[in-house]
Amino acid sequence: MRKLFTVLSVAASVFMYAAPAHAQSATQWQLTPQEDQLLSFSATQMGNEFTGEFSDFRANIAFSPDDLEHSAVSVTVSLASAHTGEEERDETLQSDEWFNSDVFPTASFTANHFEKIPENEADEYEYIAHGTLDIGGIKNEVELPFSFDIGEDGQNASTQGEATLNRMDYNLGAKSWSDEESISHSVIVEFHLALTKNP
């Protein structure tokens, strides 16, 4: 009987040691309804800076500052919702040389690898999301610096960040507009989002 008890005890110990700890889940967030959400882009055309916005986009966000390993983000943007305040430019953006939105109606960004920027290197942003940006079926790896602030009640948060992209990496305007003096190759994308914790 003592032998059986010893064997069972050892087996239980081995099982407890081998069983993985319950995986922590990052907090799920959603865009706060009726709050201003900003996803913008800016570039230079003929030496003059212009800014545009996407008015239609969705975001699935699972993020916890203390659980970056299980955090993940997925954003889908309606390219037809781009507007810059200049009708001719807005129409050109939807053409087959730019967004080609009739064929590729959406762009997407997905990321599941996040890192904390060391305090001695952090400036405006605290984290970097390493993800994939897909525009027009062309996918490139992108590093997106951002900050993430959770309110005192733990139910609301805000996040903002920016990345500089090269439009030529996505063949945007690569034929008639390849000259950087006409439109800059660099495009700055920024976002400011208000979030609410999923119930």
Image (cartoon, rainbow, N blue to C red):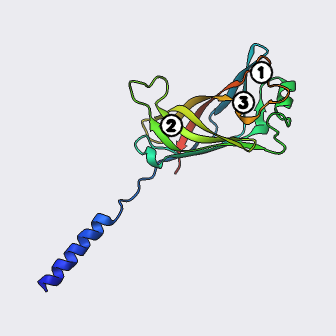
Which dot marks residue 157?
2
Q: Are marks 1 and 3 in contact (CB under 8 Å)?
A: yes
Q: Position of residue 96 (x, y in %)?
A: 85, 37
Left or right, 7 with reference to 74:
left
**Which residue is at 53% across, 31% downward?**
145
Q: Which residue is mark 1?
A: 183
Q: Residue 184 sits in which quadrant?
A: top right
Label 3 residue SS: helix
Mark 2 → mark 3, Cα distance in angstroms:
31 Å
Q: Position of residue 119 (x, y in %)?
A: 39, 27
Q: Residue 48 sits in which quadrant?
A: top right
Left or right, 63 with reference to 181:
left
Name the kind of residue labelled 1 in the image: Ile
Left or right, 94 with reference to 113:
right
Q: Is residue 15 above or below residue 184?
A: below
Q: For marks 1 and 2, give the one nearer the viewer.
A: 1
Q: Which residue is mark 3?
A: 167
The tag earlier along the polypeptide, 1 or 3, is: 3
The tag earlier along the polypeptide, 2 or 3, is: 2
